[in-house]
């Protein structure tokens, strides 16, 4: 079960939000985040500024977007730009684990507000959602700093140019995406929740690249699994597809309370010298019924500004331990990860910085 953290103390203008001493409820929330991030790296946040009504409209907009004919999506939606990882990525294009066949998902990353080809009302709803998630992501940065005993603005400093709505953060615009997993082959008989067949995996094992990810799961979305490791990052072939996977089961919430899964990315794990971990996760097809259903999710990837230097803070070294990683920048790190996911060998041109 994924721990639930109430973010409302960080959404109100009090305590660390206004630069004052943290309130008791902020400290309690930060403690819960710290425990989860040292363990699985996955928490469920509630009261983070997305109403049940906005969530419902967002998934309805995503469904309408994906329900458009294949040809329309390929021809009319913004074209895929590998250098910025924006545009419409059809099923079979992306593989978050290059050791596996392509993921069974489609994902339009409609950056720079190019909403050409989107259904009526999509733009307004998407922007409303991104605005709410941007605020939640900033407040989560405050909570993380408090959780790790750092200066309040420690992570916020890395989000000066962070802007989920306009995505004017060149050269890396890949920040938020609606995800659609169309019906697919059922899992092979008897393999149940530990599939080894490629057809039973919708997203291959990976860790997210940046600082942290906000993930909204659509109604009935099943199959997200994590595999714990002892700190650090596990991806590619390191963890393997075999045993040890556990279902991500967010604690059920009362009617009207929206939950989002937040997970630590590889860059934040690295930043903390692996005090927090970026846990490998994947999306499987658990049952024939799940295979027959459309699965929807919405993900926002929170990354430091392109030119922000992420250097391991010496405070994260355990007694007698070396810092594990040299400094990097938001851009350098993410471009390396994206090139891996796209299977590109040569550095992609940044184009616009
Ligand atoms: O759709 C999901 O549940 C997870 C997707 C994911 O892990 C990702 O896009 O990084
Ligand atoms: Fe992920």
Image (tube, grey):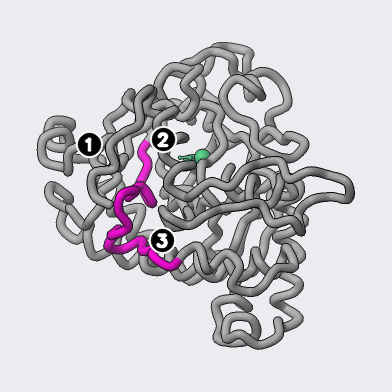
Name which residue lies at 42% across and 47% down.
Answer: 331
Position above or below: 248 against 138: above
Bounds of the magenta span? Answer: 160-180
Q: In this view of the protein, can residue 183 be seen by the observer?
A: no
- Does the magenta portion include 128? no
The crowding category of the residue bearing disc 1, from other C-alpha atoms within 10 Å (few below 14, some 14 to 19, many at least 20), is some
**Depth-wise, is mark 2 or mark 3 nearer the camera?**
2
Q: Which residue is mark 3?
A: 55
Sequence order check, earlier mark of 2 and 3: 3
Name the one closer to the observer, 250 or 307. 307
Whether tag 3 and tag 1 are in contact, CB under 8 A, the answer is: no
Identify the main secondary structure in magenta. Answer: loop
- Please state which of residues 341 and 270 is positioned toward the viewer in this rendering: 270
Q: CA distance from mark 3 to mark 1?
A: 26 Å
Q: Can you tell which of label 3 and label 1 is closer to the viewer?
A: 1
Q: Is there CB contact under 8 Å for labels 2 and 3?
A: no
For the point 19% across and 61% down, the residue is: 121
Disc 2 marks which residue? 338
Tell me which corner region of the image, top left, top right, bottom left or bottom right, holds residue 130. Answer: bottom left
Q: Residue at x 51, y 20 (%)?
A: 200
**Horizontal and vertical percent position of residue 185:** 42, 18
Identified at 69% across, 44% down, the residue is 277
Residue 59 pos. (x, y %): 36, 53
Q: What residue is pinned by disc 1? A: 80
Q: Earlier in the sequence, mark 1 or mark 2?
A: 1
Mark 1 vs mark 2: in front: 2
Q: Secondary structure at mark 3?
A: helix
Residue 54 image offset from top left, x and y in percent: 38, 65
**How far is disc 1 from disc 2 in space, using C-alphas?**
14 Å
Q: Is residue 223 above or below residue 15?
A: above
Element marked by disc 1: loop
Earlier in the chain: of badge 3 and badge 1, it is 3
């Amino acid at each position: 079960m994924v721990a639930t953290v109430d973010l409302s103390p960080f959404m109100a203008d009090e305590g660390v939000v206004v630069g004052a001493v943290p309130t008791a409820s902020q400290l309690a929330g930060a403690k819960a985040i710290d425990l989860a991030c040292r363990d699985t790296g996955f928490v469920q946040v509630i009261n983070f500024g997305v109403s049940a009504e906005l969530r419902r409209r967002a998934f309805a907009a995503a469904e309408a977007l994906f329900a458009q004919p294949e040809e329309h999506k390929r021809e009319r939606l913004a074209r895929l730009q590998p250098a910025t990882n924006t545009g419409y990525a059809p099923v079979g294009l992306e593989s978050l684990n290059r050791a596996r066949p392509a993921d069974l998902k489609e994902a339009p990353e409609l950056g720079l507000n190019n909403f050409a080809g989107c259904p009526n009302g999509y733009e307004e709803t998407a922007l409303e959602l991104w605005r709410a998630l941007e605020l939640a992501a900033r407040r989560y940065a405050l909570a993380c700093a408090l959780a790790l005993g750092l200066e309040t603005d420690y992570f916020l400093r890395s989000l000066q140019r962070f802007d989920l709505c306009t995505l004017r953060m060149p050269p890396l615009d890949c920040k938020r995406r609606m995800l659609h997993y169309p019906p697919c082959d059922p899992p092979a008989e008897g393999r149940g929740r530990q599939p080894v067949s490629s057809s039973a995996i919708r997203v291959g094992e990976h860790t997210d690249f940046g600082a942290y990810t906000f993930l909204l799961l659509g109604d009935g979305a099943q199959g997200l699994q994590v595999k714990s490791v002892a700190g650090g990052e596990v991806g590619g072939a390191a963890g393997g597809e075999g045993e040890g996977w556990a279902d991500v089961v967010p604690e059920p919430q009362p009617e009207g309370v929206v939950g989002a899964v937040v997970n630590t990315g590889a860059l934040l794990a690295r930043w903390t010298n692996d005090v927090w971990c970026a846990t490998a996760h994947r999306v499987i097809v658990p049952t024939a019924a799940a295979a027959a259903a459309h699965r929807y999710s919405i993900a926002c990837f929170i990354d430091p500004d392109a030119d922000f230097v992420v250097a391991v803070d010496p405070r994260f070294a355990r007694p007698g331990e070396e810092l594990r990683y040299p400094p990097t920048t938001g851009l350098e790190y993410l471009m390396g990860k994206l090139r891996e996911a796209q299977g590109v060998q040569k550095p992609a041109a940044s184009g616009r910085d």
